[in-house]
Each structure stands twice: as structure tokens, then as C-alpha cells.
Image (cartoon, helix red, strand yellow):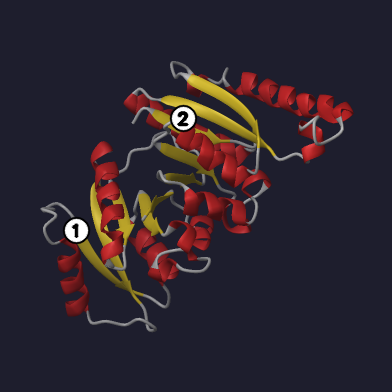
Amino acid sequence: MQKILVPTDFSKEAENALKTAALIAKKFDAEIYLLHMLELPLNLIDPVQGNSQNVPEALYFMKLAHMHFSKIKESDYLKGIAVTEAVQFNHAFKGITEFAKNNNCELIVMGSHGSSGFQEMFIGSNTEKVVRQSEIPVLVIKEATPDFNIEKFIFATDTEIDNKNTLVKAIEFAKLFKAELHLLFVNTPNNFTTSKQAYADLDEFLKEMNLNNVQKHIYNDVSVEKGILNFAEKFKADLIGISTHGRKGLAHFFNGSISEDLVNHAKRPVITFKI
């Protein structure tokens, strides 16, 4: 892992994400890209289509952002880390995914406000769109921690064949951090299957992958989201992983708002992998 993207709105939550990104960067001697998106009206940024008299306002916001960056880069937790700052005019979710692709970033680390929802640049559907559309893993952080040692990594799956490629990505991520990978299937009343069949489905899902060190778990709950959260709490997981379906919406039982709800409500870090 060589390049980590950290979108920031200069909030405390964004700083928590940056602190975690710094720990990861030090572990792999990686570079951090700090990105701030300015979602301004067109007439403030385009003198051709808008009023050129307003351009200084756009420049003011850009200068202000770079002033924030200067203070951040002086932080002790960033010492010894190569940090590149960038300010762009674009929609938050679109700008983040495009920047990650154009700069060959391998991981996006974002902050979350928790159950109250995402604020500032992450408000409403912007975060869900970043999670859905990002071609690279998105790691969502709640609180800053003194370290980011992942020992127990839960990857929730519905055992659909489409999710195999995300399992491969989760395995690679687990290997990077030398973490134990635990495959989780949540059994719900609306989609009930026997434990025997569920384990058989997991075995079939893992077939031909030569994974002897992956542990399998079946957990019963009223919903998939609650099952993941409750199992993670009981199991004291360090990280929760889920799959997303990109523009098609969230995979199978991760449909609707479950992905965003999970990210909002989980007390632990959540990482998403696109199918």
C-alpha cells in the first residue's frame, strides 16, 4: 500500500480519519493525499460561464483551505509521512472517486459522525455514493485510536458468487495487517436457512480458494445489520468488512440503506469493497 486518500472537511471526525491513515501510512511507508472539495456555484469558479468578479471569492476559499492544511501538516502524528494536499472544485462524492482513480490511490479513509449521520462534505447520500462508486476500499473511522492493529477482521457475506471477488480483496487486506479473517453469515427470519445449510453454503463459497485459516460463523438476528453489529460487539472485532454493488445498489441483503446505517451505527471501523 503506497497511496492513501483522506478527504477532509477539517472536522474532528475527519481528523480522526487522518490520524488512522497516518498510522497505516507509517506501517507501510505510504504517502497520504489530503483532499478538500469546494462545492461552489459555477459562477464563482468559471469566469467564462459566470461572473468573473466572483472569482476572488473562490480563490479566497481555496486559500483558506490551504491555510488549514498548513496547520494540519504540522501535527506530530504526521511527522515522517509524505503528505500531498489538494483542493478541488467538484461535487464531494464525484471529486473523491475521480481523485482516487487519477492518483492511483489504494485506500480511502473517511471520518464519520456516528448515529447522527454524516455531516459537512459527507452529508446525506454523498458518503453512500462514495462507498458505492469507489473502485478501491473505503475505510470509515469513528474515533481516533492510539494504534490500528487489526487482529479480528469480520467479513459479512450472503455467499452469493458475485461476492467472491470482494472476499479476495478482504483476504488481501487481512494479509497486509496479519489479521485473522472471520467469515460471517447472518441468518434472519425473512431469509432463514438452517445452520447446516448455511455452513454448507459457506463451504461452497470458499471452495477452490485454499483458505485454511478463515473461520466461519453463523449468527441469528432480526436483521442483517443488527446481526453484524451484535456479532461484532460480542466477538470484539477490530474491523467489519462488507461488499457493495457499485451503481447497481448494495449487494443482496446489503440493499437499501443498510450500508450507510451500518457505517453510522457501528462503533468499530468499517471497510467496504466494491463487487
Q: Residue at x 52, y 39 (%)?
A: 98
* 15 sits to left or right of 175: right
Disc 2 is placed on an element classified as loop
Q: Amino acid at mark 1?
A: Gln
Does dot 1 land on a helix, a strand or a loop? strand
Answer above or below: position of 159 versus 123: below
Q: Quadrant of residue 149?
A: top left
Task: Please rate how many residues cluster around mark 2, counting C-alpha atoms within 10 Å: few if below 14, some from 14 to 19, many from 20.
Answer: few
x and y percentages locating residue 5 in the rendered image: 48, 34
Please state which of residues 239 and 260 is positioned toward the viewer in this rendering.
260
Q: Name the image quarter holding residue 22.
A: top left
For disc 1, the marked residue is 215
Q: Any mark on residue 66, and which?
A: none
Res 179 quadrant in image: top left
Q: Residue at x 46, y 39 (%)?
A: 108
Q: Quadrant of the C terminus?
A: bottom left
CA separation in Å, label 2 and label 1: 35 Å
**Mark positioned earlier in the residue sequence (2 or 1):** 2
* Coordinates of residue 167 in the picture (x, y in percent): 27, 54
Q: Quadrant of the N terminus?
A: top left
Q: Which residue is mark 2?
A: 103
**Percent coordinates x, y for residue 79 in the rendering:** 47, 17
The reply, left or right, for residue 263 in relation to residue 217 is right
Q: Residue at x 69, y 21 (%)?
A: 67
Q: Is residue 97 left or right of residue 169?
A: right
**Would residue 4 be found to the left or right of residue 41 on screen?**
left
Quick one: label 1, few (<14), some, or many (20+) residues within 10 Å?
A: few
